[in-house]
Image (cartoon, grey):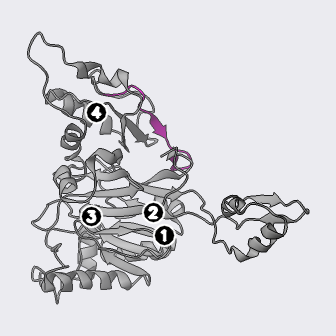
Amino acid sequence: MTGRRGLSSLNLTFLGTASAQPSLTRNHSALALRLNSDVWLFDCGEATQHQVQRSKVKMGKIEKIFITHTHGDHIFGLLPLLASMLNGAGGTADGVEDPRIHMAQNSSNPIEIYGPFGTRAYVRNGLKYTHTLLGAPYVVHELRLPSDPPDGDHISLALHASESPNGRNIPQTNGVWSNVYHDTVVSVSAAPILHSVPCIGYVITEAPVPGKMDPAKYISHLKRTNTPMSVMSRLQQGESMELSDGTMLQGPLRRPGRKLVILGDTYDPSPIAELASSTDLLIHEATNAHLPALDPHTKAEDTFESIEARTKSRGHSTPQMAGAFAARIGARQLVLNHFSARYPGNDDVEPTAKTIMEGIARLAEEHYSGKITCARDFMSFDVDVLLQEHA
């Protein structure tokens, strides 16, 4: 990423859109963000590697994995995925040294994992007690809350043979984790969001990009002064230059890059509101909804208020709550995600499922007037200026 001049392609692919229980049409939580050819995963629920294999996402291109929280439906797929990505397997027979036991010390480009306190212990324990060695290294960076220990791994096991010792413990500053990753092209910041366990929301921000250029503004000046047309590329980048006759040309000002907000499970994402402000795309959970005319599982005593209270008590949101937060932060588009298993994920081919998901979207519309999409497994779209969907 660091050697790339910009993002020609930014694509989202939903690999799993279920909440606690998977269904025949929804897998556990996982989302792939493709930055040109590189892939970043956000959450890695059970069977994510199968979902990757069934999608157009290339497993070998995964370079970073961001975990929102350590509930199983968001992390149980991490160890199998690492084993598949990094040629993991059991050790060799007695007396035969496996070259992988020195792997972490022999490579400077480990797979990077970001997550809350406990992520490092989970990965190290899982690899240790399944006797798994990896053919390439990994590193875990933990985003520590003020209530977490500021230093150390807090696990009795020694560093795993495949684990880089360079994992960072990243403290909060003013309630957020700013630039937990950044290069010249893109940055990732994060903030806590309220759930039943410590949970994180991530904000991905593209660096400012060249503004729209009108060549007619420059060509006559370049021709008059016999300036090579090749300088147009410098002007396109926003540079200024003085021509041979003293004329100053200024390229178009850069405009803000794209901004994405990916939330984990939450009943109140207020702590990330400022960081998430004016995002181009918000991905927000909508675990439960009250659909008395559409959902046959609706109980006679259920109301919008009772469903919201029950949903919040379990650390989750309704579509109305998601819509209200999208309006609060000025999101340009809202994608609802993380649905109860009672809501089918085949609305692209099944009319009843489509009716239910349209009903869920209408609930979010009560508080939000922008474009709303209900995610389903393998839905994929490019994120550009117009956020055109290619599902």
Mark 4 or mark 2, whichever is nearer to me: 2
Disc 1 marks which amino acid? Answer: Asp
Is residue 49 highlighted in magenta?
no
Q: CA distance from mark 4 to mark 2?
A: 29 Å
Residue 358 or residue 318, whichever sits in front: 358
Give the magenta part as a residue range.
163-180
Q: Which mark is residue 313?
A: 3
Mark yes or no: residue 100 visible.
yes
Q: Residue at x 35, y 80 (%)?
A: 364
Q: Residue at x 77, y 65 (%)?
A: 250
Q: CA distance from mark 3 to mark 1?
A: 30 Å
Residue 75, horizontal then vertical, whole percent? 24, 47
State the quadrant of the C terminus: bottom left
Residue 70 or residue 267, whichever sits in front: 70
Q: Determine the residue located farthest toward the top in the rendered image.
A: 95
Residue 321 versus residue 181 in the image, above or below: below
Q: Which residue is mark 1?
A: 280
Instruction: Answer with the quarter of the image where residue 372 lies.
Output: bottom left
Q: Residue at x 51, y 58 (%)?
A: 205
Mark 3 or mark 1, whichever is nearer to me: 1
Q: CA distance from mark 1 to mark 4?
A: 35 Å
> For mark 2, does the 10 Å Cα neighbourhood hold few (<14), some (14 to 19), or many (20 or more) residues?
many
Disc 4 marks which amino acid? Answer: Ala
Answer whether labels 2 and 1 touch (C-beta < 8 Å): yes
Mark 3 or mark 2, whichever is nearer to me: 2
Local SS, label 2: strand
Disc 3 marks which amino acid? Answer: Ser
> For mark 3, does the 10 Å Cα neighbourhood hold few (<14), some (14 to 19), or many (20 or more) residues?
few
Q: Which residue is mark 4?
A: 121
